Image (cartoon, rainbow, N blue to C red):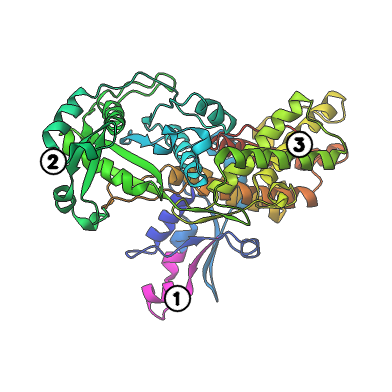
Amino acid sequence: MRLGVEETLGALNAALGPGGPVWFKETRARHLRVRDFLAPRRALEARFGDDQVPERVVHAIVGLQGPGVAPVLSCAPTPAGLALQLRRSAVFERVLGAVAAYAAPTVPAAPGPRVVLHCPALRGSPCALRLSQLRAVLVADHLARALHAHRVSVRLVPAVRDPHMPTFLQQLRVDWPAVSERAATEALRSRALAELTPARNAEALPPGALGRVYLKELVDERGRTTGYDPKLDSCLVTEDLLAVLAELQQAVQDWAEDSSLGLAAAPDAGADSCMVVHVVSCEEEFQQQKLDLLWWKLDDQAPLRQKHLVCGPVKVAGAPGTLTAPEYYELRHAQVCKASALKRGRDLAQDSAWMEIFRVLSVATIKFEMLSTAPQSQLLLALADSSISTKGTKSGTFVMYNCARLATLFESYKCSMEQGLYPTFPPVSSLDFSLLHDEGEWLLLFNSILPFPDLLSQTAALPCTAPGLHITARTEMVCKFLVQLSMDFSSYYNRVHILGEPRPHLFGQMFARLQLLRAVREVLHTGLAMLGLPPLSHI
């Protein structure tokens, strides 16, 4: 079984006896020089009074064992509290001896609820897509990838119908279904006609409108405290609106096996076992609330759990608010091409391989800008060229640059090995990980590789049973993690010479370091896959 941060924290807190959690994991380099976990002094005083922690408790902590619990080296009182350090060489050995277990999501023992992800912004055309809607699209795509990785059965709605949208989504590396047969609306139309309030003047209805359905009763029934706007009182029913409802209805009723991922529908395939998550921009939410209530009004089998993941507004510094999603992409793509031409002293526009790399870098820039902030918060975009620099440590370009550096490192080792300078890579079980004693090596393992499966689980966690209409999602976590991982790797790589002189007495440390960076590479590739981004071999 893999070692886990959550498992270790759980065992440490249990060793202190009854009470709330006390221990926390250190992340800062200056603290990790002396400890890995800390139980703060004030929290211990609240638990044990002014007395010291009993010796028997400290002794039990040092001897902690259990599934997923990291081996402990020492535990001692300090002015800051109870400081614990792990047996680092043993942790290196356990983790780096099973890299695949740490570079992939943890598959839950039991399947979670079935989820319909609905992104209304995808019903339009790309040229009409505002930046706030683009943000909602990217959040929905990232969330779908995270849920799929955890074997959650997901249906994506709507199927894209605009003829230009699939090409634009392909540019953005967004994986979304294209056009399908229109769902039947007859039953919904019949129910809607029965619920319509007679119009005083039929001529006042716009083309395609059937009439108005009042929703005030449903708002009061569902309770305003759940988050529905109290100003909601009626909804103009149109043929287009019924088509939207029919597609959602069909996604719930006809839950089919997802053959592309080998995922079967849950045995309890009723509407109650399904959650619908509407991923909307803040401008779209009021209309979506109307749609929710209308669905309940017209369909007795509508899911009881409909949740709104509302993405905050996107503001652009120094630019008009009318910038569309395609214009934003073209701007970033032009900046990437310009930066590359300046760096290399020539225009690479005619080189198809480089142009593909530039497209990936453009999308990486956009996705890290759009997804690095919690989705419910306002996002401020700066459109200056500095946003695509490999020198800045916060950009998607910086992450992709370090991905390419890792690829170059392993390619250099392979070429040197083929030339006879280095031996072939030995079995991992024969490596001596006690040779890893640089603080940057522990920082990479303890802050990036070891907690990565837990981070992926948190990204895919949806508060299914939380009360209220609105939910949050941690879609910013992967981008922030990859940026921090890239910063830690870059600092270590700039300071430590990995491929040293071809001398036999240096090979042991070199191979231990290469195995560590293999794990970093696999974690980085998995994280990029969650964003729909391929790894790059050079930039």
Disc marking residue 470: none
| Depth check, front residue: 358 or 179 | 179
Disc 2 marks which residue? Answer: 197
Q: Which residues are magenta?
A: 37-58
Q: Position of residue 216 (x, y in %)?
A: 17, 50
What is the crowding at mark 1: few (fewer than 14 residues within 10 Å), some, or many (at least 20)?
Answer: some
User: How far apart in space, not on screen, are marks 2 and 1 (Cα)?
Assistant: 64 Å
Q: Residue at x 55, y 76 (%)?
A: 79
Q: Position of residue 149 (x, y in %)?
A: 46, 33
Identity, as a three-letter code, of the amino acid under mark 1: Arg
Circle nearer the N terminus (2, 1): 1
Disc 1 marks which residue? Answer: 42
Q: Is residue 359 magenta?
A: no
Circle nearer the N terminus (3, 1): 1
Circle nearer the N terminus (3, 2): 2
Horizontally, residue 246 falls left or right of residue 316, namely left
Disc 3 marks which residue? Answer: 539
User: How far apart in space, not on screen, are marks 3 and 2 (Cα)?
Assistant: 62 Å
Disc 2, SS: loop
Q: Is residue 376 visible?
A: yes
Disc 3, SS: loop
Query: Residue 326 is drawn in which quadrant?
Result: top right
What is the crowding at mark 3: few (fewer than 14 residues within 10 Å), some, or many (at least 20)?
Answer: some
| Depth check, front residue: 398 or 203 | 203
Identity, as a three-letter code, of the amino acid under mark 3: Ile
| Depth check, front residue: 294 or 172 | 294
Disc 1, SS: helix
Horizontally, residue 381 falls left or right of residue 183, namely right
Q: Residue at x 29, y 46 (%)?
A: 289
| Depth check, front residue: 441 or 275 | 275
